[in-house]
Image (cartoon, rainbow, N blue to C red):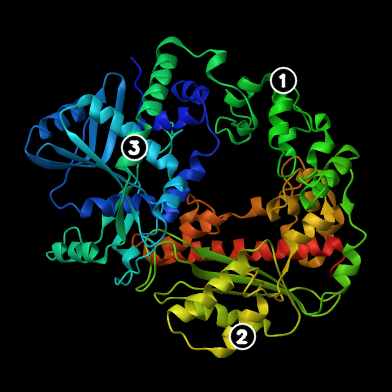
Amino acid sequence: MQTLSKSDFQLASSCPKKLVYKKAHYPTSNDTNEYMEMLAQGGYIVGHMATLLFPDGVEITGSTAESVAKTNEYLEQENCTLFEAAIKAGQKIIRIDVLKKRGNKLHLIEVKAKSHHTEKDSEKQKKQLEKYIEDVAYQYLVLTEAFPQFEVECSLLMPDKAKRTQIDGMAGWFSIKPGKDSNKELNEIITQQKPKFNKPEVVFKYENDPEKSRYIDELLKDGILDYMSVTKEVIQMQSVIKNRSNLFLEILNNGINSSHYKINKSCKSCEFNSGNYMPNGYKECWGELAIEKDHIFDLYFGAGEHFDELIEQQKSSLWDIDVERLKNKKGEFGSRGTRQLIQLENTRNNNEWISNELKSISGELKYPLHFIDFETYTGAMPFHKGMRPYELIAFQWSCHTIKYPGAAPEHKEWIHTGDQFPNFEFAESLMDLIGNTGTPLMWATHENTVLRGILNQMEIFGYQNQTLSQWILNMTHDNDKKNKREGRLIDMNRMTLEHYFHPYMKGKTSIKKVLPAIWNHNPYLHTVPFFKDYAATDLLGAVIDPYDTLVAISEEDAEEDVVNGGTDAMRAYQRIRFDDSLSVSQKEEIKNQLLNYCKLDTMAMVIIAHHWGIR
């Protein structure tokens, strides 16, 4: 008989048909990304750190039947604290992160890497945390059905962004090793297929230290993890949660029918759209509606309710869209609607579009041109004393500079791999390179946000450098009504939205969509001397996306994940800083991968600008 775990419940709550696909072990598209993000942001570390805060805690291990039996046995004691307590009520089964029993009272504690802020409006935050509270509500339902005699309190235990750690290098107190083979479901990844990942082993640096208790006392005193009580909200949800769980059990026992689910615009992000891997759950649901060459889901920013209306009418083509429905509330084609019209017209004509204004705008750029890209880290565990959870660390920049029209781009870079807080040195080194002349260009707003964050940190940490402060003010934009200003930074993503489109991009404007659209369809770029390093083809002669040319350099690290995305970069930086299992050469290899990835980001900007006539 099939069971309904808490991850099953979460997944089915987004769409009941997904529960069927999960139980049938259909392939999914984003487990790897979610797993890497959990590693990079410290989700597994937060879970382990939480257990250290309960010195009397006992972990429940073994098969499901063994774990349920052990949990029941412990709960017969007057007092106990259990990690991964296994509770079963009929076909419903859960694992509770931390379960405290004191007499006839139980405290159900769900540990999350998601942060909260104890000095801000808790009701507003609870609305933002609703899916996590629903998770706790399902656990409460199962727990109270299994043990109706107990009074149950419920809490989320999360990093508190109101707290600044007094521990230097806290993130280095924990390291991650590959987990051993296990049949235990990874609740953090709700579509997890059991053979795909094992829960990593988190190692506490001072586990075998004679003074282990002193370090744990420091963690307790530091208070980076704090509680949010959700008992009231959980109890209020019980009727809804019970009805929902009954529906999911009916589906597991008797099968699903058309009244249980409905395809709609939310299917765009379906985890079971596994591309060429079969079976494909999304395609099973959508049938012929899934195979439109120009699909409504390709439309920039979508069209809300109009999509659901079209789907209801069994239509999914871009050409089924009523363009009048793309107007805003004022009955006008705003910036979004205008972009959508550009996409529709030029997709129909299979035409690359460059606005008439782009040339004149380009002519206003002042040389030297500085194409910049930053790599940053924001994780649950602070790296340095005085930092909050998820506070920004800027550890790398790349810059390609074109000094005058027609000049070859010159590359400079900076990366931090040491033990000190890097942000101010990061900004100062960039200031020394760029100075106050020329035009700095970024892709989207990340670089602007980072520099503004560093300016704020200068005030918080009392870092005195008036020249740097003024330089950041001159560089950055601020839309705040009181502090509104226009800085030097030019956003190439905004330029794309307003002045460039290629059908290959569909509705996307990220640099990883714009670059291959331009690179793959303009062979003349491959002959430009300073772009030749990225000109590669596969065995069939097809052009390779430059980002796919990023590979491990040394054989020693060839099996490691190659850095070719932001999450990869975060994880790579974390490993360089705190993974003591790496050899010197392995750390150097990861550093080189970071440098190559960031360098390609700024070269991609140069390639795109070159195609636009900015040279």
- Kindly tell me whether residue 51 is visible in this rendering: yes
Q: CA distance from mark 3 to mark 2?
A: 49 Å
Q: Name the mark nearer the viewer: 3 or 2.
A: 3
Q: Label 3: which residue?
A: 234
Three-letter amino acid code at the position of disc 2: Gln
Between tags 1 and 3, which lies in front? 3
Q: What is the quadrant of the C terminus in the image?
A: bottom right
The 10 Å Cα crowd at callout 2, few under 14, some 14 to 19, many 20 or more, is few
Number of marks:
3
Circle 2 residue: 470
Residue farthest along the left direction in this orientation: 78
Task: State the mark number for residue 228.
Answer: none
Which residue lies under the disc numbered 1?
288
Point out residue 211 in the picture as x, y percentages from the top left corner. Answer: 13, 66
> In this view of the protein, which residue sits in the foreground, 416 or 96?
96
Observer-nearest residue: 216 or 114?
A: 114
* Alpha-carbon span between mark 1 and mark 3: 41 Å
First of labels 1, 3 by sequence position: 3
Q: Which amino acid type is marked by label 3? A: Val
Q: Earlier in the sequence, mark 3 or mark 2?
A: 3
In this rendering, the answer to whether 321 lies above or below 400 is above
- Disc 2 versus disc 1: distance between alpha carbons? 58 Å
Q: Secondary structure at mark 1?
A: helix
Mark 3 neighbour class, 10 Å CA radius: few under 14, some 14 to 19, many 20 or more: many
Q: For the view shown, which residue lies furthest in the right direction? A: 356
